[in-house]
Amino acid sequence: MSKWVRGSIAMGVLFFVVFAFDVTAQSSLLDDVEFVEAVNWMYSKQMTSYKEPEQFRGEDLVSRQQAAKFFVGYATNVLYQVIDTSRYCSFDDLQDADPTLKNAILQSCLLRLFKGNQ
């Protein structure tokens, strides 16, 4: 499957999860080959922490921190964008962030995806 097709599937899954997830549909999703492939692909591209479709919590709201991880993973591992380490970025609330997501939050600013406090 090409990276563009997988990327489209991943973006479709994100759209589905954010805008149209129905908890009653979850069991049928786990049997959907494209859904399973999309979750596995997103995990391989560091866009989600969930390796297995059963772990993927599509009914949860997406936080800014989690969105940073998703978009940084997509930008660096699918679009192969290079992180601009010469850019200065800061966030007033970074100390309160999930420790496993702090690097992605900073990288989201270095990639010009999120602004930070500038």
Image (cartoon, rainbow, N blue to C red):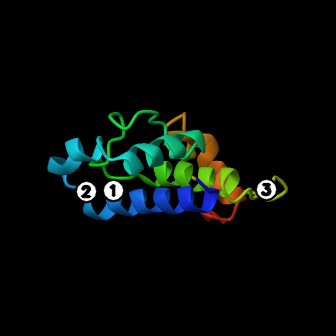
Q: CA distance from mark 3 to mark 1?
A: 28 Å
Seen in the picture, residue 4 relative to 28 is either above or below; the reply is below
Write the residue at 40% across / 57% down.
13
Write the residue at 46% across / 33% down.
51
Q: Return the residue at label 2.
A: 21
Q: Callout 3 environment at 10 Å: few (<14), some (14 to 19), or many (20+)?
A: few
Q: Which mark is residue 17?
A: 1
Seen in the picture, residue 31 relative to 1 is either above or below; the reply is above
Name the front one of labels 3 and 1: 1
Q: Callout 2 environment at 10 Å: few (<14), some (14 to 19), or many (20+)?
A: some
Taking the image as shown, residue 44 lies to the left or right of residue 29, namely: right
* Mark found first going from the N terminus, 3 or 2: 2
Say what amino acid the circle numbered 3 marks: Val
Q: CA distance from mark 3 to mark 2?
A: 33 Å
**Helix, strand or loop at mark 3:** loop
Give yes or no for contact between labels 3 and 2 (Cβ–Cβ under 8 Å).
no
